[in-house]
Amino acid sequence: MDYTESQIKYMKRALDLAEKARGFTQPNPLVGAVIVKDGEIVGEGYHHRAGEAHAEINAISEAKSKAMGATMYVTLEPCAHYGKTPPCANAVVRAGIKEIFIALEDPNPKVNGKGITILEEAGINVHTGLLRDEAIRQNRVFLTNQIKKRAFIALKSAQSIDGRIGPADGRPLKITGDASHYRAHLLRRDYGAVLCGVNTLIKDDPSLNIRYNISHPENSPVRIVIDPHLRLPLSGKIWHSSAAPVLIYTLGNVSSALKKRIESRGGHIVSLPDKDGIIDPLRIAVDLLERNICSVLIEGGAATLTAFFNADLWDEYHCFIAPKFIGANGITVYRKSMENDDDAVVLNAEQSVEICEDDIRIIYKNRQGVELCLPESSKKKALSGKSDAIHLVRR
Ligand SMILES: NC(=O)c1ccc[n+]([C@@H]2O[C@H](COP(=O)([O-])OP(=O)(O)OC[C@H]3O[C@@H](n4cnc5c(N)ncnc54)[C@H](OP(=O)(O)O)[C@@H]3O)[C@@H](O)[C@H]2O)c1
């Protein structure tokens, strides 16, 4: 279907409204809605936070009787089930909407086409797919949670141009510049949790919090450490701030005395089973979602990133590259050695590039992403392969 400029404009507005609630709706999606009558917007709304009214209801409340005979633009299929709020599809019918544009079908099994069926059976003219790719991108965390039944995983590294994330002796070294550092904190704001391996906690003593005054206190990401043998120090900066809980993934049994000491500092220990000597990254990703932690930013070090790359368990990789050489004995971002030509790890990814003053950030997106599980039109685009252009963004 070809869409008019105004139809695109209204759906863009609905996407912008949805975006206002980023960080507040988990485990729910971001959703925005606009109601248009005689070329004028008569109602707008978005889903503000989980448990509160959905976007369509807020837009209908604003439009009141003007919704009768109007057109609605909504970024996700209206729900068809009783959750914390009644079904939106029925409310849309009752409001007298005569035509509706839906950017994306909702893969939640409780909805999954049922909302569209309610609308069509009531005689509403339904169109799906307007700005679908933008809607997929906006709700990539929700879609991954629904379809892959695990937390959305983003990896991040700050490395030299020769691929080193630190000097050989492991002493902390500021690799990237201030612009990248600021970007990295903005990035943390988008995730339910920030994670590192225990060696990073020991060597770098990170706080794993958000600085620069850019976060809402309610939204501080949970701090997570993978520490199979509980080697983490109980005196580091991670314990200084009470901004968010600290979760420690470990292997096997933990002595009750140590558990008590960790818990008295605000830590929670989660024991997972051993798989080939490590904690299976997939178990971590599934466990996070079960705890309502819908997304995680994994910031290293090398062993931790390597475990997630090897499991192909990543949705996005944010690679910050500084214009410096650290040298051959530095720590490489990917730890495994290549023995045969076929061993090279090739990221099956699309990428975009951003300039951060002297550094560059490459954002890789895993091509085995949720797009492949969505309806045909999105699937074709996701499979289109290597021809994707590199988008260069200067800031
Ligand atoms: N530039 C950057 O972006 C960046 C970011 C972070 C860190 N770093 C640097 O990286 C260095 C640390 O890297 P690293 O590779 O030594 O350590 P790391 O990844 O921080 O921690 C590795 C350790 O964490 C545990 N671990 C991680 N994943 C596991 C899994 N799936 N299952 C079981 N255990 C797991 C293991 O602990 P056990 O040994 O107890 O089994 C492992 O040895 C530091 O020098 C730090 O400065 C750089």
Image (cartoon, helix red, strand yellow):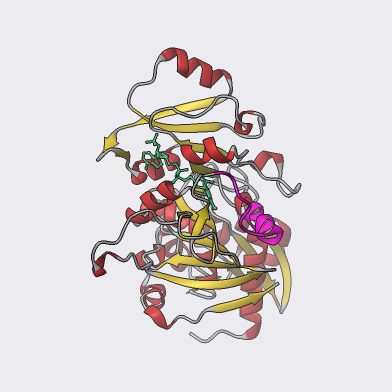
Residue 383 drawn at (x, y percent): 36, 75
Q: Residue at x 54, y 59 (%)?
A: 326
Residue 314 drawn at (x, y percent): 41, 56
Q: Residue at x 53, y 66 (%)?
A: 161
Vertical side of 204 occupied by 94: above or below: below
Residue 287 in sight from this viewpoint = yes
Please tell me which residue lies in front, 394 or 270. 394
Residue 354 relative to residue 82: left or right: right
| Image quarter for ligand 1 | top left
Residue 64 drawn at (x, y percent): 71, 59
Residue 180 is inside the magenta segment? yes
Residue 60 in sight from this viewpoint = no
Vertical side of 131 occupied by 243: above or below: above
Please tell me which residue lies in front, 111 or 38. 111
Vertical side of 166 occupied by 259: above or below: above
Q: Residue at x 53, y 76 (%)?
A: 130
Residue 214 drawn at (x, y percent): 73, 50
Vertical side of 264 occupied by 353: above or below: below
Quarter in which the C terminus is drawn: bottom right
Q: Which residues are magenta?
A: 171-186
Q: Residue at x 54, y 39 (%)?
A: 203
Please tell me which residue lies in front, 181 or 28. 181
Please tell me which residue lies in front, 309 or 359. 359
